[in-house]
Image: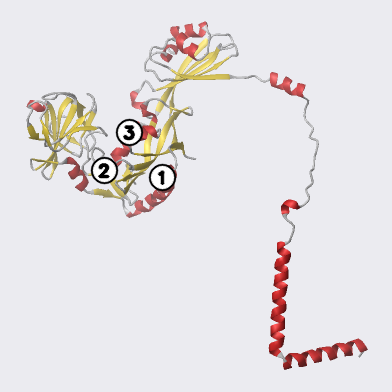
Amino acid sequence: MGQLERATEATLARGARLVHAHPRTLASVVALSLACFGAAAYGIAQTAPDASDLPRRLVTEIVAHEDLPSQLEALAGHELQLYRSEQTRAGDGAESLLARMGLVDAEAAAFVRRDPLARKLIEGRAGKLVRAAATPAGQLEELTARYAPANADLAGTHFDRLSITRGADGRFTARITTVPLATSVRLGSGTIRSSLFAASDESGIPDAVAVQMAEAFSVDIDFHRELRRGDTFSVVYETLTADGEPITWNHAAGRMLAAEFVNKGEAYSAVWFKDESGRGGFYGLDGKSKRRAFLASPMEFSRVTSGFAMRMHPILNQWRAHKGVDYGAPSGTPVRAVAQGIVKFAGRQNGYGNVVEVEHGNGKSTLYAHLSRIDVRQGQRIDQGVRVGAVGATGWATGPHLHFEFKVHGEQVNPLAIAKSSEAIELSPAERQRFAGVAQQIRGQLDAALTVGATVAE
């Protein structure tokens, strides 16, 4: 063993004897040493250089690019197509419409006036969507107009596209095709300050969607009496487009897909869902149908002019109990049966004018009065929602409106109370599982809709 090894062994032996003789003293020394080391480390960390003071290095590199003249030459060789868009107006002629689009083309105007198909551009209802491609000199190259189809049965699903094209020989041709409408999903929300329609207009939501929303919640909320300032709503709905442009006819809206309405602090939800039979309807997030055995109203959302209460009779000038509900609406507005049943009476009846009365079973019946026309016959079996007639002013009526009564064993009762108390349709267990997935997805969209006025869903 060398001298170094012997010295090391002797040192370790003395250290072991020291630890054995003074264990507490040694532990205190070690703890104090560690504390000092930690303080030193903290001090070092605090005095480290700031990242913003570190040296920076700027690297530059020359990027080769084409010279400016060649870029200008390439741009000059690129053909530019100018498009101008407009909507037709009442009283438009060929020249006035083209001039409003910045087109000065006598040949095109003459063709529109002369050709039977092209003339449809300025015939019929205003509001056609027009898009034209023009030369830099303002001459028409191609014009496309989109508008409601001539076939009224396709108004909610298709549009007519009129195309006017200038050929290589300078001559114009016109053709019309009927094309399916496309849909896109939009989100919207609003706050009630005065009325539902005022709030939906403020949020850019189509009236047709507001009507569907009122329909979906008609049993939960009396929109004529129970709306409160500060009530809120959010809605997910389809908008109809023709070649990517929102249409200006048919209310420009499709199906309301979902909505949430907070009335007097209570939230109500409605989701559009098709059951296993393919029949669609609105359901709450709990899976219960918003549809009842009896609808709350025989018309789509409209103005109630006289409710189920005492009133001054407009003709007799006497206070009388009004045992029905009057709905103000233009003549010709469709009136529907609130439930399935058998037509008990269809004809004229004294002060009620043209009347339809329907029996629904269990002593329940409904009456629709002052109709301008009757669309059912006595003894006919009808389903809920079938058109029974149209609003009018026949009989003792001071203006066009519908007088509606709901009777139980011959006694008039409040129609809304009957609708609220009627049974709801529930989904089967198998359908509930599928509905749960739809409801979960729509819940996220409704939450997103709360943060927007009206926007397109991604």
Task: Tell me which amino acid carries mark 3.
Answer: Phe
- Sequence-wise, the earlier of marks 1 and 2 is 2
Q: Secondary structure at mark 3?
A: helix
Q: Nearer the viewer, residue 284 or 260?
A: 260
Residue 72: image x %, image y %? 72, 21
Task: Give me the disc on residue 197.
Answer: 3
Q: Residue at x 28, y 38 (%)?
A: 215
Q: Residues within 10 Å of mark 3 (few under 14, many from 20)?
A: some
- Sequence-wise, the earlier of marks 3 and 1 is 3
Q: CA distance from mark 1 to mark 2?
A: 19 Å
Q: Residue at x 40, y 32 (%)?
A: 204
Q: Residues within 10 Å of mark 2 (few under 14, many from 20)?
A: many
Residue 416: image x %, image y %? 19, 42
Residue linked to disc 1? 446
Task: Tell me which amino acid carries mark 2.
Answer: Ile
Q: Residues within 10 Å of mark 1 (few under 14, many from 20)?
A: many
Residue linked to disc 2? 221
In the picture, measured across the screen, residue 117 lies left or right of residue 281, that is right
Q: Nearer the viewer, mark 3 or mark 1?
A: 3
The vertical placement of 39 against 444, above or below, is below
